[in-house]
DNA sequence: TAAAATTGTTCCCGTCTTGGGAACCTTTAA
DNA sequence: TTAAAGGTTCCCAAGACGGGAACAATTTTA
């Protein structure tokens, strides 16, 4: 019974949490001053002040007219993170390629904290607008990316994630129980690809295939489009063929990381 | 005599600095464990451990097989930062547009900490490869973006930045004294655009114009290409015209932020 | 232009967080 | 199976940190 979430014990560093709270607020508000932050986070002005100084020293924030805001340093960090994904360049080029080919939204996601995080997203002129954006986390049970990844994770990890899920019906089609999900994963293993038929957002269908390196799943790649344009025929034909081909290319180019 | 750098006094929070150091190491190394980090940063394992727990709690880092790495949460933060730049969408679309038009590298930069930080970069198929990447900081005296911005910053800020500059001859053409720089800024003000003629990197020429909102400079937009392709004629003709047009469009679309 | 109000900065103090050492547990290597 | 290395926990003493209040700077109002 490995139900217990691991990350429990151990000490946390309060001042670091304060600093991260400041960063969070700046992320949301975009701009804030000492007094505002002090009110907002329920700390004294002097405390906030020292923290801001520390963050400014490290060039993470910038003093603007009306307060402090996050600096572009963050963008630099993000670039580093991307480049640390050994095969980011290949992933990006394949994702972009698929957009040219299909005109729909194409995304690459990996598993983090039991959810799917988007590593790269590309869209064409006619692509539908969605809320998803790079770095964002989405449930695994309601997305094709998530289900594709879940299918090929080590069995115990898959179980652990499923056990900790809090199912929420995002649409009438959303899978909302471990049993259904297990059945779906079996189906995916047979097909080799995962479908999201309006399970996460009404009117949108997606298809995804895992990208693997031997036994380990690196992530998954998906195509998303409006149900009107993504017919059953196109989904299981052209699109299925396209994602799988892209996934293969990425896999082939990953033998060196 | 406003030579003194401001950000001096005030307390710094040690534990936050430790946490940021950890993040820095993970950024560089890509992956690291408790023991490694402890050695690397000269702290006890227990200290590092608590910090990692804190960062993991906040989903900033992820425990991988061989240690911890930064999570995609950083990408999400970067997206937020971008979107906080009121007119990011317009900037991006204009930059991308210029790439289609010219085939060269196009960048948008803003001033931070007396340097230019790249907010967006786009390149075409045939564009030259450069080291610059989004979020990176470059000197203002050796880049067209920097000089363009410097020309239109409030006079005291411009002076402050110039005073604090440590000139380094990146090539034989680099401006290396405040006097030369002032002359150059005057020239730029007359022309309306700034040129970098192999001053930052050998073989590369750039042209940049500021993007302003009334009296304040929001940033600058630039085109970069190999000297072979970027002739005097093209530089002062087609390219000058193109950047200025793009800058104008961005300015027009900024009247609402 | 002066006064008032708001925000930002500095200083000091007492507490409790935090860093470190060592022991313990877990995983990997031999 | 043992050894070695990494990861986790526990406890302690020191000094870092959060808070309050006074001070300085900036903005607003009249």
Image: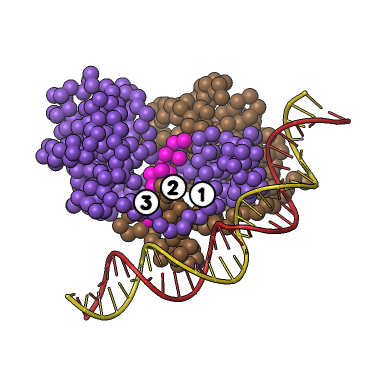
Chain colours: A brown, B purple, C yellow, D red
- Image quadrant containing the C terminus of chain A: top right
Between the residue at mark 3 and the residue at mark 1, the CA separation in whole angstroms equals: 17 Å
Q: Crowding at label 3, few (<14), some or many (≥20) Cα neighbours within 10 Å?
A: many
Choose mark 3 or mark 1, whichever is in front: 1
Image mark 2: chain: A
Q: Which residue is mark 1?
A: B17
**x and y percent of residue B87 in the render?**
29, 47
- Residue situated furthest top in the rendering: B228
**x and y percent of residue A174 in the render?**
57, 47
- Residue B10 versus residue D28 in the image, above or below: above
Task: Reply yes or no: does residue B72 show up in magenta.
Answer: no
Q: Which residue is mark 2?
A: A58
- Residue A91 versus residue A69 in the image, above or below: above
Name which quarter of the figure residue B34 lies in.
Answer: top right
Q: Which residue is mark 3?
A: A62
Name which quarter of the figure residue A178 lies in.
Answer: top right
Instruction: Give the magenta-colored segment's residue range.
Output: A68-80
Between the residue at mark 2 and the residue at mark 1, the CA separation in whole angstroms equals: 8 Å
Image mark 1: chain: B
Residue under the image location 47 percent in, 25 percent down = A90
Residues tagged 2 and 1 counted as in contact (Cβ below 8 A): yes
Q: Secondary structure at mark 3?
A: strand
Query: Which secondary structure class fits the magenta region best?
Result: helix
**x and y percent of residue A121 in the render?**
44, 36
- Residue A89 versus residue A16 in the image, above or below: above
Tell me if residue A130 can be seen.
no
Choose mark 3 or mark 2, whichever is in front: 2
């Amino acid at each position: 019974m490995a139900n217990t979430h691991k990350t429990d014990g151990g000490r946390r560093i309060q001042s670091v949490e304060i600093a991260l709270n400041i960063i969070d607020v700046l992320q949301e508000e975009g701009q804030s001053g000492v007094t505002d932050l002090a009110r907002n986070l329920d700390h004294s002005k002097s405390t906030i002040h020292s923290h801001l100084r520390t963050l400014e020293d490290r060039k993470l924030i910038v003093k603007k007219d009306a307060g402090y805001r996050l600096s572009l340093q963050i963008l630099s960090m993000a670039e580093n993170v991307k480049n640390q994904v050994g095969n980011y360049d290949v992933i990006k080029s394949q994702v972009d390629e698929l957009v040219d080919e299909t005109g729909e939204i194409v995304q690459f996601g990996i598993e983090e904290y039991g959810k799917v995080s988007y590593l790269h997203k590309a869209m064409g002129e006619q692509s539908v607008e969605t809320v998803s954006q790079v770095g964002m986390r989405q449930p695994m049970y309601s997305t094709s990316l998530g289900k594709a990844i879940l299918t090929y994770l080590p069995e115990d990890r898959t179980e652990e994630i499923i056990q900790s899920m809090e199912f929420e019906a995002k649409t009438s089609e959303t899978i909302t129980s471990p049993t259904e999900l297990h059945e779906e994963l079996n189906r995916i293993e047979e097909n080799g690809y995962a479908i999201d038929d309006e399970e996460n957002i009404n009117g949108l269908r997606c298809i995804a295939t895992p990208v693997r390196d031997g036994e380990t799943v690196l992530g998954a790649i998906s195509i998303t489009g409006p149900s009107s344009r993504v017919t059953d025929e196109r989904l299981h034909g052209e699109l299925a063929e396209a994602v799988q081909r892209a996934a293969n290319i990425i896999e082939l180019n990953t033998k060196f990381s």
